[in-house]
Amino acid sequence: MERKSSREVQESLTQITLELVDIVDRLARLPEALPDSPRREAMEEGEIPRDVATEVLGAVECTLEDDLRPAVRRLERASRATDESLLQDFEERGRR
């Protein structure tokens, strides 16, 4: 891959982040399609084995909250970063 300027890479990052946001939105809608598990609470508490719907729900919710949404926020920040904004952030952290 050829080297590009930081700004060009940030533009690519913006596009990739938009694609990731679309994936996040699609994943967030999946639980709506799952059947209700009448004993979901007991499954989530570990009292009885999980069914597939509860496992899928847990995997989707955890992945969104722990991984994908934080990743989108980090990538969005990086795609908008400038030398000036990074210097300002650095100086503000030094004052704490």
Image: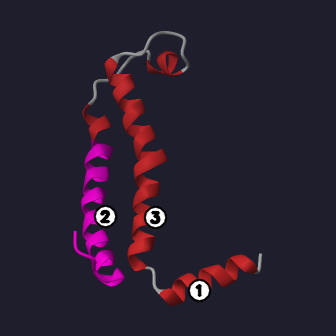
Is residue 90 found left or right of 20 in the rendered image?
A: right
SS assignment at label 1: helix
Provide the secondary structure element on which disc 2 rests.
helix
Q: Does the stretch in magenta take in 10?
A: yes
Q: Which mark is residue 74?
A: 3
Can you give x and y, in whole percent of width and height, for residue 14 in the image?
A: 30, 71
Q: Amino acid at mark 3?
A: Arg
Percent x, y of residue 70: 47, 56
Instruction: Classify residue 94 by image quadrant.
Output: bottom right
Depth check, front residue: 3 or 72: 3
Question: Would you place residue 14 above or below residue 68 in this image?
Answer: below
User: Badge 3 local density, few (<14 within 10 Å), some, or many (20+)?
Assistant: few
Which is more toward the observer, 14 or 57?
14
Q: Which residues are magenta?
A: 1-29
Judge whether 40 appears above or below 60 on screen.
above
**Residue indicated by mark 1:** 87
The foreground one among 20 and 13 is: 13
Q: Main secondary structure of the magenta part?
A: helix
- Which residue is located at x 45 percent, y 11 percent? 49
- The answer to which quarter of the image holds residue 1 is bottom left
Query: What is the CA distance from the residue labelled 3 to the residue labelled 1?
Result: 17 Å
Write down the residue under mark 2.
17
Q: Is residue 28 above or below residue 78?
A: above
